[in-house]
Amino acid sequence: MAKEIEVRDGLLYSRDHLWVAVEGGKARFGLSDYAQMEMGDLVFLELTEIGKDVGIDDEIGVMESVKTIDSIYAPVSGRLTESNPVIEKEPKLANQSPYDHWIGVIEMSDPSEAEALDDPAAYRNRV
C-alpha cells in the first residue's frame, strides 16, 4: 500500500511542490512530501546566488536524487536571502521529514504574490 502524502495545514504550496511559510515579508520554503517522494532519495541539494533578486519561477537551485536531477524554482519574487546549510549538507533530511527542514528564504518584493499559491485544501486536490 502506498504511503499517504502529508499536506501540512498552515502552509501554502507552489506549482512546483514547494511548501511556503509566509512570515511577515519573508517566504520560507522547502520540499513538500509529494515532491520528496517523487524525487526519491536526495543526494544533493543547493541554492545558488544568495542575495540575488529573483522572479517567480526563476531557477534558484538544483536538487539531485538517485532517480533524477531537477531545478528548484522560486515560489515568489524577491531577494533570496538565506539557504539552510543543514539541508545542503544532509539532503536526505528532506526525505525523512520534509516539513521540518526548510531550503531557503526569500524576502518578498510583492507579498500579495503569496495569494496565488495553493492553500492546503487546493494542494490536496492537486496531488
Image (cartoon, helix red, strand yellow):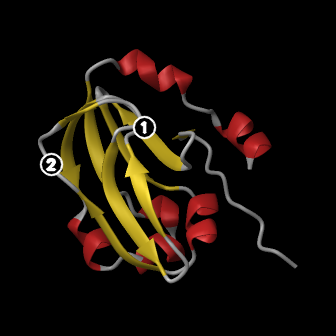
Mark 1 — residue?
75
Q: Which mark is residue 24?
A: none
Quarter of the figure with residue 37: bottom right
Three-letter amino acid code at disc 1?
A: Pro
**Element type where label 2 sits in the image:** loop
Q: Quadrant of residue 33?
A: bottom right
**Residue at left 51%, top 70%?**
97
Q: Which of the pair 80/101 is nearer the observer?
A: 80
Task: Give above or below for 104 relative to 11.
Answer: below
State which quarter of the image contains the N terminus: bottom right
- Going 62% across and 44% down the picture, which residue do you hit? 9
Image-based side of 16 in relation to 85, left or right? right
Q: Is residue 121 above or below residue 31?
A: above
Quarter holding residue 89: bottom left
Residue at x-position 56% and y-position 49%? 17
Side of 50 where 12 appears, left or right:
right
Please provide percent x and percent y for residue 83. Answer: 23, 56
Label 2 packing within 10 angstroms: few (<14), some (14-19), many (20+):
some
Name the kind of residue labelled 2 in the image. Ile
Spot occupied by residue 25 in the image (x, y as percentages of width and height): 28, 26
Q: How many marks?
A: 2
Compute the Cα span from label 1 to label 2.
Answer: 15 Å
At horizontal 72% and vertical 61% (from top left) the residue drawn is: 5
Q: Earlier in the sequence, mark 1 or mark 2?
A: 2
Is residue 2 positioned above or below 35 on the image? below
Query: Circle 2 sits on which residue?
Result: 50
Residue sticking out furthest to the left? 51
Horizontal placement of 102 versus 108: left or right? right
- Where is residue 29? Give x, y as percent: 40, 48
